[in-house]
Image (cartoon, coloured by chain):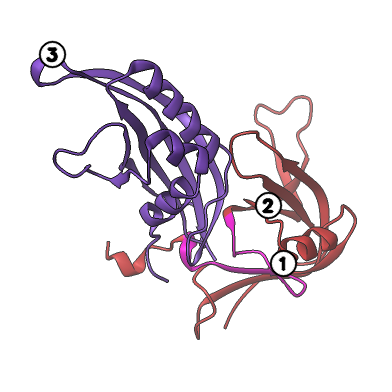
Chain colours: A purple, B red
Amino acid sequence: MTLANTGSALYARLAAGTALTAELGGTRVYEALAPQGQTCPYVVYFRAGGGDDNSAQRRTRSENWVVKGVSIDQAQARRIDALIDDRLHEAELTITGWDNYQTARRTDVAYAEPGEGGVVYWHRGGTYRLNIGAQ
Amino acid sequence: MAKANRIFGRDLYATIGTHLLHTDFTTFSTNEDGQMVDLSAGSDTYSYWKFLRESTTVEYESYFSGDSLGSALRAATDPGDSGTLTIAPQGTAASAPKFECTEALIKTRRIDYPFDNGCRMRITFQMNAAWDETSY
């Protein structure tokens, strides 16, 4: 058994969302960091905690991932958040070697980041908990 | 104490009949109760007891699996069903301790369906024969 490649599974799930990629203007979905100078809007996601449950002989993990949209338009950031939610909340991700028995939104992420020249980057998204078990 | 000398649930092996119990278990508890008779007289300062017999129950909790193994286990553990219950806390290596009863009755079964977590099944086994300790 190899450790779960949850990041790739999240990317696949988000990139396959046609409404989401249409709102983004392309497959602008990035793990951990967007490319420097990346034009808004885009989605960035990263691991924000969790790990092995160590509660049974079958290995299970609970992983928390922040998935958020970034836009200079607050309303668009909210729309992206809703489209991310459509793709992830109660979805079943395909992760090689693992069963994803629950994906659920846990907390909201919402803040504004000041940029150069008075630009404001609006971050809207959520923390999603993925419960997975080794097959 | 050396780590190797501490018994962990991760090594446990358990079966009821031909069904594995350890795959997704979270807790096993064995309870060996001595049934006693009160021999005290009304004028006695202290109470006096006589041991009659032992009655053993085993409580088991696991995640409730929806696959074929889980379904087969569920079908075999209706209250009133029985089978040979084996618990080996340190696995099945040579000389590892083995607890066994040739007729364990399913006394109670409870399945919890929480909205935000995996479902769990709890079973209480009532021993209907000796609870023996041997070894592999």
Residue occupied by mark 1: B69
> Label 2 is placed on what type of residue?
Phe
The residue nearer to you, when weighing A50 against B25, is A50
Helix, strand or loop for disc 1 = helix
Within the magenta stretch, is there residue A18?
no
Percent across and percent down for residue A121 are: 23, 22
> Label 3 is placed on what type of residue?
Gly
Image depth: mark 2 or mark 3 in front = 3
Q: Is residue B90 left or right of residue B114?
A: left
Which chain does tag 1 point to?
B
The residue nearer to you, when weighing B38 against B26, is B26
Helix, strand or loop for disc 2 = loop
Magenta segment boundaries in residue numbering:
B9-25
Label 1: few (<14), some (14–19) or many (≥20) C-alpha neighbours in 10 Å: some
- Count of numbered marks: 3
Residue B65 found in image quarter: bottom right
Q: Residue furthest left?
A: A116
Q: In this view, does B45 lie to the left or right of A80?
A: right
